[in-house]
């Protein structure tokens, strides 16, 4: 019976990692694939390698938190399988409604529900985690808002990355700049790939725990095996279902300047890598989304004072806040027709996304609590 449950637990862990790989690869390498810098196959290989690197170096910190610090009891094998099942269910719900739910938040919710039901919740650690869940998105928004408002226009005017026809890099046999490719384009290409690898590293550091932390916390597999299983499953997702998400994310992001995508990726990956280093499970999707919103808000509100912008007296936030090219930076507070168009984000849609970010871990925690409180599991 134990062997069967362990096989089931590993299968669920692989399913979770498989779906993480499918979604995270699009987030990490969508700009690179969408702009033709790398192929989907190359993106999958890089995702696998750097997710494993992040999972191996930083991932154990998050695994330790989720597997042994949120609750004071040792996971049973059945409890481990149930927690992983809730994570997989959250992925299914988020895919059904088209909302990027956080697997980290959902997994923590399921573990917290177990702890409350059994009276073993480490309240201090849980408070620390939830505090960072509040701080991280706010930090992501304001860092990118300040970049968008005060720095982005100057970067866009001087370092906008344009693509020429044909290959950027040729191999003879070593990689070199292709004829007709400017140094700026070549440097931008290197930056896109490097930052994609950084995003993959952050994804592995944060998400390896989501797939295997309960099994490691219960002592059924060791940390090294857990990281390999999780990151191997992430790689499997990268080589298979990520092909569709790369199309979707890549095509969406190529409507935005590559420079904006790079800023979003660097800021969000840095936040998640820092949190993973201190053992806090957090969502890369949530941080990246708040970076996009913050960058657009900061870019659009250059036409008013910061006080008026925060009081809602600025212009409608426009998709052109990110897509418009900056040929000449206008002084702060001057009207700019480029920044007036349709909405960059619909408040109703934004509210729905935030609602699901709160709903999925809450449902996971409540369902876990009821299951462990009312049944002899």
Image (cartoon, rainbow, N blue to C red):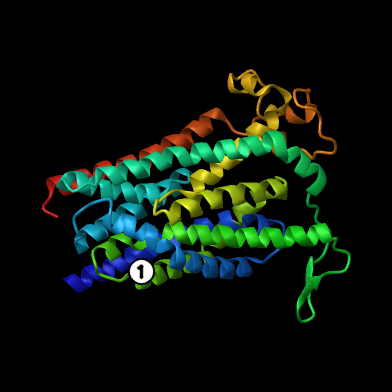
Binning the other alpha carbons within 10 Å of mark 1 as few (below 14), some (14 to 19) or many (20 upward) gives many
With 8 as the anchor, is 376 left or right in this view?
left
Question: With respect to residue 356, does 66 lie above or below?
Answer: below
- Choose between 184 and 23: the one closer to the eye: 184
Lateral position of residue 291 relative to residue 186, left or right: left
Q: Quadrant of residue 338?
A: top right
Residue 260 is left or right of residue 171, and the answer is left
Q: Residue at x 71, y 50 (%)?
A: 258
* Residue 61 lies in quadrant: bottom left
Disc 1: which residue? 226
Tell me: residue 1, above or below residue 119. below
Give the quarter of the image for residue 50: bottom right
Q: Secondary structure at mark 1?
A: helix
Q: Is residue 64 above or below residue 224?
A: above
Q: Residue furthest left?
A: 376
Can residue 260 be seen by looking at this rendering? yes
Please tell me which residue is depicted at 52% across the width and 44% down the height of the picture. Answer: 287
Query: Can see residue 239?
Result: no
Residue 12: % across, % down: 33, 63
Q: Position of residue 177 (x, y in %)?
A: 81, 69
In depth, the one of 316 and 284 nearer the eye is 284
x%, y% of residue 288?
Answer: 55, 46
Q: Quadrant of the N terminus?
A: bottom left
Residue 110 in the image: above or below residue 44: above
Quarter of the rendering occupied by the C terminus: bottom left
Q: Position of residue 265 (x, y in %)?
A: 60, 51
């Amino acid at each position: 019976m134990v062997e069967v449950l362990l096989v089931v637990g590993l299968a669920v862990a692989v399913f979770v990692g498989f779906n993480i790989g499918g979604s995270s690869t699009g987030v990490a390498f969508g700009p690179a694939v969408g702009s033709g810098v790398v192929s989907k196959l190359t993106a999958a290989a890089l995702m696998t390698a750097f997710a494993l690197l992040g999972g191996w170096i930083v991932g154990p910190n998050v695994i330790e938190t989720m597997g042994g610090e949120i609750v004071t009891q040792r996971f049973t094998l059945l409890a481990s399988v149930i927690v992983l099942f809730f994570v997989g269910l959250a992925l299914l719900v988020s895919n059904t409604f088209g909302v990027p739910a956080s697997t980290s938040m959902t997994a923590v919710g399921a573990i917290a529900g177990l702890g409350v039901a059994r009276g073993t919740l480490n309240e201090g650690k849980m408070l620390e985690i939830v505090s960072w869940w509040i701080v991280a998105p706010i930090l992501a928004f304001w860092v990118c808002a300040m970049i968008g408002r005060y720095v982005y226009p100057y970067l866009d005017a001087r370092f906008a990355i344009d693509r020429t026809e044909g290959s950027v890099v040729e191999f003879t046999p070593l990689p070199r700049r292709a004829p007709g490719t400017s140094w700026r384009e070549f440097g931008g290409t290197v930056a896109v790939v490097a930052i994609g690898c950084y995003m993959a590293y952050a994804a592995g550091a944060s998400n390896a725990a989501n797939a295997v932390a309960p099994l490691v916390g219960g002592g059924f597999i060791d940390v090294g095996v857990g990281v390999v299983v999780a990151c191997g499953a992430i790689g499997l997702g990268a080589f298979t279902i990520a092909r569709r998400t790369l199309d979707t994310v890549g095509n969406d992001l190529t409507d935005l300047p590559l420079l904006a995508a790079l800023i979003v990726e660097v800021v969000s990956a840095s936040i998640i890598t820092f949190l993973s280093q201190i053992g806090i499970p957090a969502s890369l999707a949530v941080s990246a989304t708040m970076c996009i919103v913050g960058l657009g808000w900061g870019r659009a509100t250059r036409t008013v004072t910061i006080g008026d912008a925060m009081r809602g007296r600025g212009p409608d936030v426009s998709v052109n806040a990110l897509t418009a090219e900056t040929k000449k930076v206008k002084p702060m507070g001057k009207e700019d027709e480029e920044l007036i168009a349709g909405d960059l984000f619909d408040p109703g849609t934004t509210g729905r996304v935030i609602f699901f970010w709160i709903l999925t871990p809450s449902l996971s925690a409540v369902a876990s609590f009821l299951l462990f409180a009312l049944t002899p599991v």
